[in-house]
Each structure stands twice: as structure tokens, then as C-alpha cells.
Image: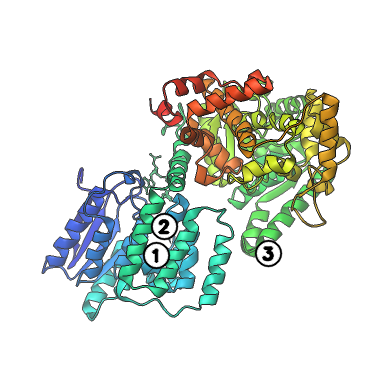
Amino acid sequence: MSEEKVAMRMVGRVAVVESDNQPVNALGHAVRKGLFDNVSAAAADAGVDAIVIACKGRTFHAGADITEFGKPPQEPGLVEVIELIEACEKPVVAAIHGTALGGGLELALGCHFRVAVPSAKVGLPEVKLGLLPGAGGTQRLPRLIGAVAALEPIVKGDPIPAPRAAELGIIDAVAEGDLVEAAVKMAEAKAAEGGPLPRISQMRTPPTDMEAFEAEAGRLLSRSRGLKAPATCAQTVRNAITMSFADGTAQERALFAELRDGPESKAQRHAFFAEREANKVPGVTKDVKPRPVNRIAVLGAGTMGGGITMSFASAGIPVTIIDLNPEALERGMGVIEKNYRNTQRRGGLTEAQVDAALANITASSDFDSVAEADMVIEAVFENMDLKKKIFKDLDAKCKPGCVLASNTSTLDVDEIAAVTSRPEDVVGMHFFSPANVMRLLEIVRGEKTAPDVLKTAMDVGKKGGKIPVVVGVCYGFVGNRMLHARGAQIEPMLLEGASPSEIDGALTKFGMAMGPLAMSDMAGLDVGYRIRQESGRKAPVNDAICEMGRFGQKTGKGWYLYEEGSRRPIPDPEIDALIARVAKEQGVTRREFSEQEIFERLMFPMINEGAKTLEEGVALRASDIDVIYLYGYGFPVGQGGPMYYADQVGADYICERLDHYADVTGTESLRPCALMRKLAAEKSTFAAAKAA
Ligand code: T1G
């Protein structure tokens, strides 16, 4: 089956048409053609009573081949293949294992019957790529399960486990035992039964309670953050209620093309591949085996330690959370229990899942407990001397081969590793707060970190539901270092006349969930204040606010005011007056600010700093930086990440603006770095630079 991606074999009088296009049987041209030819042949073969559509490898068709988007279409298209299957006079059964996603589920909905293994998942995740199901899914699913029930799978795009899909009526049976055998049995039975075959396109959408429909659509769209695809998906489902199948699919195809060719989907498709690209780390090849990790020890029962513990306990990995201060340990366990029960109340986890996760956690105030662990994650206070002392003790107590990880968010991992006799076992694992929610994991590769230690940290991170991105050692690594470059512009702009709401507004308008000042109010201003005090750095306005005891949401006042029980930031004239006073003391002339200037002075220095991390090899590739910002800093997915965004804006424009701001502010550090200037001069992009 070198070129042939699809083959047919007979099981009795049933033709089993099997695809083999690894790794995910994407419905690229060769697969579509193979399906079309083999199903046509089976349909015309008198020796065939029925057909089974199945796939080799780890999954059923995981959708259209995303890499084909934007390229000239090749016949047959997926719609034609599905129409051929649905029109077939012989029963066609889809045999589903792994994931039937996007075009893969649409193909299965074109079949007359569907059977799946219990572990299978089905779904229409196109909306996560800024698209909509473009091969009939928006019209067939509502006709099969009802318009209200079809909304969430299409507007949110999450996969549905087979047992639930059977309850909903998306699949006809869950096969215990061999899948293809079960599918062949079903096909034989249906052929023997005879009679009209269920063709979903000929069904009418069941009567719909429009009030319930619009309420459900409203609920789902309330979290779509202004992205186009979710609302368009909801509209296509609404069309399935009012339009014929032909008109509904014509609308579907037109809206699909519009989204496919739009900037949001291009950005989201970039994000999809960027996330997968981040897995490819030089020196960590496929034959590097991860070390076994059957127990993790987390040092420190504070906010980060608690969140990290939950991530792994929820994933079924036994965790020992250690805090030498018994009160802190008890408090930390209390927060963990409370967080789990809150998630359970919101329906995010079942009681059984919460109990299982809690059962995976052992609390200890005995440091020697680290001796049982295969991996230790240190999550104590951000202080170098303290971390060095701990790593010295870990070196003495931990078993050979134990991975020694630090959750430091800024400090030099090599300096920490150097106090141990096993620097090759030391790695940074930088989680983001709240660590049980945020998916990003910056894995900091030290000079001596062994490839299998990196591999182990990446694998364990993925098991904990994280998206690992490997970065090098420098102050603040990639994410925080770029954030500092952005942050360094905030105080000067406030002193020069911009208001806190204008600063935050410039980024929320761009699509960020929250602006930098509201974000720091949520995280607590005292954290940054203590770090500045320790490092001797000054932030005149921020320091003044902290010295008034205003630490953000936790004190009801920070950059903004917060009413009791509310997280909504309210502008505070007292802060405007404070800023004006500090500006006067600093002799700064105040002026009006345009939104464009604020946005550019926040975004462009950040991009420039990202480029520096590429120059220095701290970041492996520009798309890694995008993954870091998409999953760690709430960068709007419809913008693809800061470096992808830079490529849309153009390095030449960014350089011209950075030079301009350096001139008007006298801040030389704003000047574009060599890589920015090179891309500008060559009219090139970060994407092209990577490909080169
Ligand atoms: N097209 C092309 N390549 C794909 C692909 C796809 N649909 N899915 C995965 N890959 C590549 C991926 O880049 C990686 O490559 C390798 O396969 C393994 O993937 C008409 C328009 C199926 C759950 O959105 O969610 O159908 O990095 O690392 O973690 O309506 O892949 O090794 O070179 O992610 O086991 C809709 C996308 C398409 C599903 C497996 N389908 N895929 O996860 O492996 S649009 C999707 C996934 C569509 C129709 C529309 C996941 C997975 P490389 P992986 P995994």
C-alpha cells in the first residue's frame, strides 16, 4: 500500500475498505481517491452484500488533511466521497477506533451505520481551527440528534467519548471485542434485513424548541471571545432547522470557504501546527527513552505547589506534597480539597474523579519522603539561596536517576544544578498560575541537562495535561523575559499620561482576556513588589501603590478598585492622582496617548525581546514563542501568537516604530535587535527564517 493509502479485502461477502495513512489517517487526496475507487468497486461488485469503512493504525480518520488547506483542491473532494457512500444501495458501516474527528466523523455520518470501540472519541473540532465542519457535518448531525444537542459538539468542538456518543445517537453501537469483526457482523445483519437504508441527508431535523436552541447558542457563544467561527457554526446549525439539506450544505460550503480564507483560521491553524512542532527538540530524538516516573514529590504546599500536585494527581500519578511547615501543609491540602470540590460543583469533575485524585495525594512534612520519588518538583519561594540549599539536600536524599526539577520562574537553572553532584538530572519545569488550570509548561534545559531528563519532563508534563515547550536558561526564560520587556513600557507611559484603563484597553481590544494591570491585580502586586525589593529594581508608581497597602484583588484595591465579591476592575481617581503626583516628582511632562501608540509600545518591545531569545537560542523557534504566549499568557488564538502576529504586521514596520519610540523616549533598549533588522531588510518573516 506504498502509494495506495486505501485497500479492500473481503470478509465473507462484506468488503472491508481500510485506509492506512499514518499517523492519523488524515483525509488527504490519496485517501479520498482510494475510498472513492474502492467503495465504487464494492458497490458494483455482485459478490459484495455490504461494506465496512475502517482504518489501520492508532485512529480512524482524524479529519481533512489540514496541510492541504489553501492549496488547489484535488478531486474527488470529501463531499463527493461522502455522497457516494451515502447513496450506496448496500449497507455501509463505519468502524471507529481512536478518534473520528472533523471530516472523519462527517464521513462516518455519510455511512448508514456507525460502530465504535469504547475508548473511541468522535467530534467536530473544526471550530478550534477557526473553521466549521465543511463536509455536511453541520446539516447531518442536527438531523441525526436534533439541533439543540448538535450545538455544543459543533460550536465548542470537544471530542465525545463513544459511550456518550451512543447515548446521543451519533453511533449505533459500542463494540466489545474486535472492532472490524463487530462491524462486519452489523453489516451482514443489515444486508440480511434489507429495506431502505438510513440516509441522514434525507432526514428532517427533529422539531426544535427555538427558545431552548437560542438559549444554548447564547450560553456557548458567551465564551467565544469575539472569534468568528463559533457564531458562524451556530448559524449553520440554525440553518439545519429552517433549510433543506441542499440549501443548508450550500450555505455551509460558502461559510466554510470564508472562514478558511480568513486571518483567524490561518492563525489558529498556525497555532495547531506550532503546538506539535514544539514537541520536536534537538537531541531528544524518538529513541531517547523517558525515565519511569511512578511517584512525584512536590516541595512546597503554596499556591504553585498545590496546583502542580493537582495536575498530576488528577492524571492518576501518585504525588507526595511536602512542606516542612505543618500549618502550611494543612493549609495547602485544604486549598487543594476546596479547589477540587469547586470543580466538582461546577460539573468539571465527578465525585468519583475527585476522590480518586485526592487518594493519589500524600501529604508529608518529612523531607526524607523525597527518597521514594522518581521526580521531585521544587516549588518554594523564589529565592536563589533557598533553592540552592534545597537542591543540595535533594542531591543527598533522592535516589539515583531521580529527576530534580525546579519551578523557578526566573532564576538560573545552571546555578541551581551546579550545587548538586548530578547536574545532568536537573531541569527547570516552570508552571503557570493557577498550575492546575494553565496548560503551558516551560521546560528549562540546563547546560548539562540530559536528553532523557528532558524527555521525561516533557512526557510527565503531557500526562499532567500540559503543553511542554523547551527553552534555554536566561533571566525569565522566554515568556517572563518578553513580559518584562512589555512591562518596562507601562510605568513610562503611565507617567507620560496614559491611564491604567487605556493601557489595559489597548490589549483587551486586541483580544487579550485581561490587560497587564488587571492581571497583576489578580496575581497580587505584593509578589512583584517583594521581587523588586530583593533585586533592588524600582517601579515608582507600582511601588507607591504597594506602599499604600494596595495589593490588588486580595486587598480590594490595587491599580483598580474591586467591590466586595467582584473581580471587575473599577478605575480609581485616587490612582490617577497618585500617578500625576509621581510624574510631577519625576519631572515628567504628561500628554495624550493614542491607542495605537500604547498598543505598539506594549507589543513591539515584547516581539523584539522574543527575537532576541531566538538570536541567543533560548527559544528554539518562533512558533514555540507563539505556543508559550497562547497557552501561558492568554494571547488571543485568533492572532496566532506574538511572532506570528509580527509576521502579519511586518518586521520593517515594527523596526520603524521601535526606532521611532526609541527616538521620542530616549530609551535605547527599544531599538530593534539584529534579527528584527535582518528580517526587515530582507522583507522576510520569522516563519521563513525558520524554514531557511
Ligand atoms: N491534518 C494533517 N496533519 C494532521 C492532522 C490533520 N487533520 N491531525 C494531526 N496531524 C499531524 C500532526 O501535525 C502531527 O504531525 C501528527 O499528525 C500527529 O498528531 C472538512 C475542514 C488526532 C487527536 O482538527 O486533534 O476535517 O508533528 O501530535 O497527540 O469538515 O492530531 O508528527 O509532523 O496531534 O496523538 C479536523 C486534528 C480537521 C483534528 C491525535 N480535525 N488532530 O493527537 O498526535 S478540519 C482536527 C488532532 C476538517 C472538514 C474539516 C490530533 C489527534 P507531526 P498529534 P496526537
| Percent of width and height locating residue 469 | 53, 35
Badges 3 and 2: C-beta atoms under 8 Å apart?
no
Q: Quadrant of the C terminus?
A: top left
Q: In the image shown, does 525 or 513 lie closer to the viewer?
A: 513
Closer to the camera: disc 3 or disc 2? 2
Please, is residue 134 above or below residue 475 in the view? below
Q: Residue at horizontal 22%, vertical 78%?
A: 192
| Percent of width and height locating residue 33 | 21, 53
Report the residue marked by disc 3. 345
Q: In the image shown, does 428 or 402 lie closer to the viewer?
A: 428
Residue 372 visible in this rendered orientation of the protein: yes
Badges 2 and 1: C-beta atoms under 8 Å apart?
yes
| Percent of width and height locating residue 210 | 51, 76
Q: Residue at horizontal 42%, vertical 65%?
A: 236
- Nearer-N-terminus badge (1/3): 1
Q: Which secondary structure, mark 3?
A: helix
* Kind of residue at badge 2: Leu
Please, is residue 470 above or below residue 167 in the view? above
Q: Which secondary structure, mark 2?
A: loop
Characterize the local packing of mark 2: few (<14), some (14-19) or many (20 or more) Cα atoms within 10 angstroms: many
Separation (CA) of disc 3 from disc 2: 32 Å
Please, is residue 400 above or below residue 218 in the view? above
Residue 158 visible in this rendered orientation of the protein: no
> On the rendered structure, is 300 left or right of 100?
right
- Nearer-N-terminus badge (3/2): 2
* Kind of residue at badge 3: Arg
> Where is residue 636, by image quadrant?
top right
